[in-house]
Amino acid sequence: MKRILTLVAIFLALSIPARAADESGKAVISFLKGSAKVIRKGETSQTAATLSMRLVEGDRIETSAETKVELKLEDGSTVRISENTALVFEELSGDSNSGKVKSSMKVVFGRIWMQVKKSLGQESRLITPKVTAAVKGTAYRADVSLNGDTKVNVYDGTVAISKGGADPVLLSKLEMLTSKDLIKNVFDEQADEKEDWVKWNKSRDKLRVMIVAKEMKNKELSSVPVSESTLIELFSNNYLFSVVDEAQISNIRRSEKLKAVLKGDAASAASAGLEFGADIAIVIDTSTGIFSDKELLAGMVSASTNISGKVYRTDDAIVISAGNQPSRKVDLTEDAAAAGAIKDAATKIGQKFIADIIKKWKEEARKGGIFTVTCSNIPDYASAKELEKALAGISGAGNVTQYYFTGGRALYTVQFSGDSGSLAGEAGNLKSGGKSVAVVGVTAYRIELEAAK
């Protein structure tokens, strides 16, 4: 998919060969943009970091300017390293099969982002020169200055921050503190997201969802769909998802494409989702009837609602969830009764959709050797088609399909006889618009490319 994010308990395990029989790597580099070096435990020489490289206990990784690195731990957790950062893996013990995994990392300086898998057996500890963060399932970042001063921001779950022998301070969602005073404060999430580092991490952590609703009340079309707003709020409150802004959706409400989407055209729904950078498109149809009988209802008004909807993957238009949810509410006015019934039905069907989406990714919905390939910095459509032909020319590749090209970014699916590492190795030799293409990310079913500027 365009952005199959590294979600907790959802994302796919890396299919990359082991470095050596006696070093069953505990962390694997899954994204690398820029340059970084690795110093192996007990060694002084430096090795250039590469995609798919495995790191074990005692290894140190250092990033240069304009560099981003992502590593997948064995239990599915993710650690991302910003530019000018030094990180040491002090402990990486246990395995995902036993259900008991411990990780301990030391940030010497720089910035890191942690997405820790929620598991009873998972224990994660982050050490900086000034504080220690203990975690069991959460998303947070830590900024460490050259003198060791540390700032921790929590985006989901809880983090216990300790310093010296003092009692730990428990940080919850949208709380932060610094090592200077250990006083927790609430931070402004919108202001925080203006940082490129934060935006990049959140884009990789979350599935981006587009939600569109057609809502009728007594056979009249609603201009402000309550069901759509309810679903948007439900998905927005779940850390695994980010939702395309309602203002953006309004841009396509007047188009013929939206009409096709609301009629249940799967291809149009997927295309509309891709247009706004969504991984998932949710389309719902809401119908509400009003019944009023002063004697029978003692002056109250009854509203009966039915919501039907489908969830599409935008890369291939496959339906990954569908449902139908009725509801009935009684209130003093038509508007109150209708809003109550719609919110109830929308909440229930939204909860079903969320559960089904997560289940599909847990089952690794992609079958066989179908891989997603994205490429950014493509100058024009002709160059995107050139890359499509180049992908089709790779030995063992077939059925290459370009799903979209927008904003210099293209998405393809490729059927390939080997694994993702082999496909990435071949893709790194291709060109787009006469410019070389670099592989910057690899997971089990996804390759991320970037054309030279």
Image (cartoon, rainbow, N blue to C red):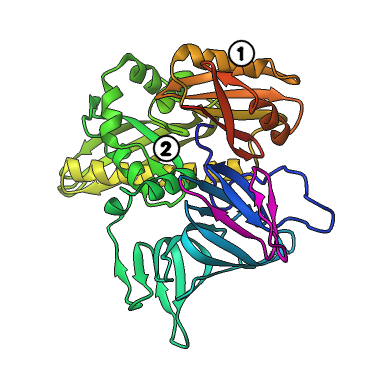
Q: Main secondary structure of the magenta part?
A: loop
Can I make out residue 345 in this image?
no
**In the displayed image of the protein, which residue is found farthest to the right?**
21
Q: Position of residue 5 (x, y in %)?
A: 52, 42
Kind of residue indicated by mark 2: Val
List the residue tagged with mark 1: 389
Numbered-mark total:
2
SS under mark 2: strand
Frontmost of labels 2 and 1 is: 1
Looking at marks 2 and 1 on the same chain, the residue that comes earlier in the sequence is marked by 2
Q: Residue placed farthest to the top in the image? A: 382
Q: Is residue 201 magenta?
A: no
Q: Position of residue 30 (x, y in %)?
A: 61, 45
Above or below, 177 against 139 in this view is below
Residue at 67% of width from left, 28% of height from top? 370
Give how far across and how far down residue 340 sits, in percent: 27, 47
State the residue at coordinates (74%, 64%). Answer: 98
Would you place residue 82 above or below residue 44 in this image?
Answer: above
Q: Viewed as shown, does residue 346 lie left or right of 434?
A: left
Q: Are marks 2 and 1 in contact (CB under 8 Å)?
A: no
Can residue 58 be found in the magenta stretch? yes
Q: Which residues are magenta?
A: 40-65
Q: Image point 51% across, 54% down: which residue?
A: 81
- Seen from the viewer's position, the closer of residues 434 and 241 is 434
Residue placed under numbered mark 2 in the picture: 209
